[in-house]
Image (cartoon, helix red, strand yellow):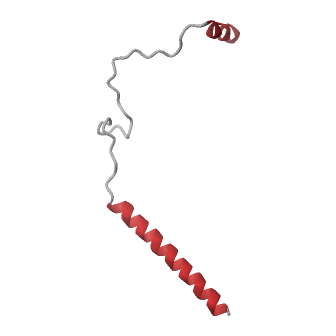
Amino acid sequence: MQTNQRRNALKALGVLGAGALASQSLLATMPQRRFPDTDDGSHGVVVGKSNKKEILYHKTPAWEIFYKSVW
């Protein structure tokens, strides 16, 4: 009885080991995905070329109440 449990455990470990080895080798052979808007040396940060003005908030009565309560 014990040999059968041991054998099943070794089979399961073998399958897991083979799967881990296959996934690591597949990751090693795949090229890294590059984003089209990134520059070399930017470490994945997208650099925009938009001419739009950034608006953080619109002056509304709700903002005025908030700023008055904070200051």
In the image, residue 43 above or below residue 51 = below
- At horizontal 45% and vertical 74% (from top left) the residue drawn is 18
Rendered image quadrant of residue 60: top right
- At horizontal 35% and vertical 30% (from top left) the residue drawn is 47
Q: Tell me the quarter of the image containing the N terminus.
A: bottom right
- At horizontal 34% and vertical 22% (from top left) the residue drawn is 50
In the image, residue 12 above or below residue 61 = below
Seen as rendered, the residue at the extreme right is: 69
The image position of residue 11, as x and y in percent, is 54, 82
- At horizontal 59% and vertical 84% (from top left) the residue drawn is 8
Q: Tell me the quarter of the image containing the C terminus.
A: top right
The image position of residue 46, as x and y in percent, is 37, 34
Horizontal side of 71 relative to 26 (left or right) equals right
The image position of residue 62, as x and y in percent, is 64, 10
Rendered image quadrant of residue 53: top left
In the image, residue 27 above or below residue 71 = below
Rendered image quadrant of residue 12: bottom right
- Using the image as rendered, state which of residue 26 and residue 40 is in the foreground: 26
How many numbered marks have been drawn onto this rendered protein structure?
A: 0
- Using the image as rendered, state which of residue 29 and residue 43 is in the foreground: 29
In the image, residue 18 above or below residue 46 = below
Horizontal side of 18 relative to 10 (left or right) equals left
